[in-house]
Amino acid sequence: MARSLVSSLRLAAILLLANAIGGHAQALTSEIDRVLFVPLGGIEQWISIRSDNRANPVLLVVHGGPGEAQWPQAEVYRPWEQAFIVVQWDQRGAGHTFGRYGKKTPDLTLERISKDGVELAEYLCRELGKKKVIVLGHSWGSLVATRMVQIRPDLFAAYVGTGQAASWMTLVNIQYDLLLARARKDGNQATVKELETIGRPGPTDGEHWTFLNKYNFRSLWAPSDQEWLQHLRSQVAELEAREPEQFKNLEDGMQFTGEHVLPDQIATNLPKTACNIHTAYFVIQGQEDVITPTQAATDYFKCIKAPKKELILIPNAGHFAFMTASGQFLETLTIKVRPVAIAHGA
């Protein structure tokens, strides 16, 4: 009987171990972690797909910059992967995708990049077994993502904008006004005279950034944005040492893309071209954003007609709220956006 009991206990232990291994294997299969190039718009483009659970809705991140690929910030997105399948995409002319084609990258325009994004959404729905995805556009990426949902609203359960762009003319006017107000407050009569001589709305071409740098516009950024810029600079040495080739692709891609899509940025006027959005529409904006001014984003939001829309302002945050207030941003995504997106097919 003792021998029988021992045998029974051994059998029970083996069964428990088998069940544990089987359960662990099942848990592993629910995760996803893939890095690959996919054909979009006639060229291969880099994406990563990560989540703790394949059942999560897809969140396609459309980076800003232009050309500011988000893979160096992968750790910030790790908590997001508990509630979403997070897809990073190095757009045409950016990051790893730029590394494939360099300066031979063809057709670098807002329209082509937006169509690439639509093709990517189709691919994700097909490969991950989803009906629709959520698209999150930051800054320049909010222009791309807006155009994506205009082209194929049926692919998107929700649009989320942050660092939301509106109109180039409005942007330069607001930034000009901020500089002039600061000069007057400081009693800097020489700068006041210079700015008044330039006149409104300030430069309307590629020299706008030189103009801003001349008058130290960066000092007007939200403190959290200034700290984030310092953080990015502190990353440079480590990133360059760890991945020198990809770091160079990141830098060169930003320069290359920025030059090519500047005319599209200048032509931007979303309040005239994109007020009717046929999907759930959210803007999660840093309240202190002066890079894509929150004032302009709020005014643009008023014209939006969508099945559902909501504007959420994050206090003490600016243009990079999704990075500098990542926890609060994720909470908003999870509580506000996720259930709506799931109800609409995500």
Image (spheres, helix red, strand yellow):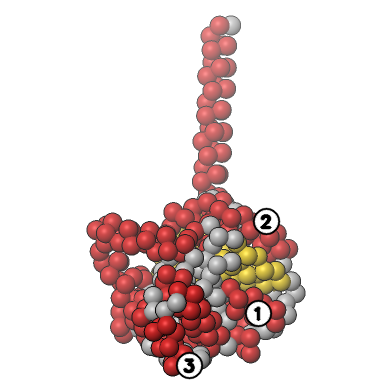
Task: Give the residue drawn at x 38%, y 58%.
Answer: 231
Label 1: few (<14), some (14–19) or many (≥20) C-alpha neighbours in 10 Å: few
Report whether residue 276 is seen.
Answer: yes
* Viewer-nearest residue: 28 or 182: 182
Q: Where residue 274 sits: x, y (%)?
A: 64, 85
Q: Which residue is mark 3?
A: 199
Q: Position of residue 159 (x, y in %)?
A: 63, 71
User: Relative to residue 49, is residue 78 depicted above or below?
Assistant: above
In front: label 1 or label 2: 1
Measured as percent of width and height from the top left, residue 143 is found at 54, 80
Please give the label number shown on residue 335. 2
- Mark 2: give few (<14), some (14-19) or many (20+) Cα within 10 Å: few
Q: Earlier in the sequence, mark 1 or mark 3?
A: 3
- Residue that sits furthest to the right in the current view: 307
Q: Quadrant of residue 59?
A: bottom right
Q: Which mark is residue 328?
A: none
Can you identify the residue that label 1 sits on?
A: 299
Q: CA distance from mark 1 to mark 2?
A: 25 Å
Distance between the alpha carbons at the discs numbered 1 and 3: 23 Å
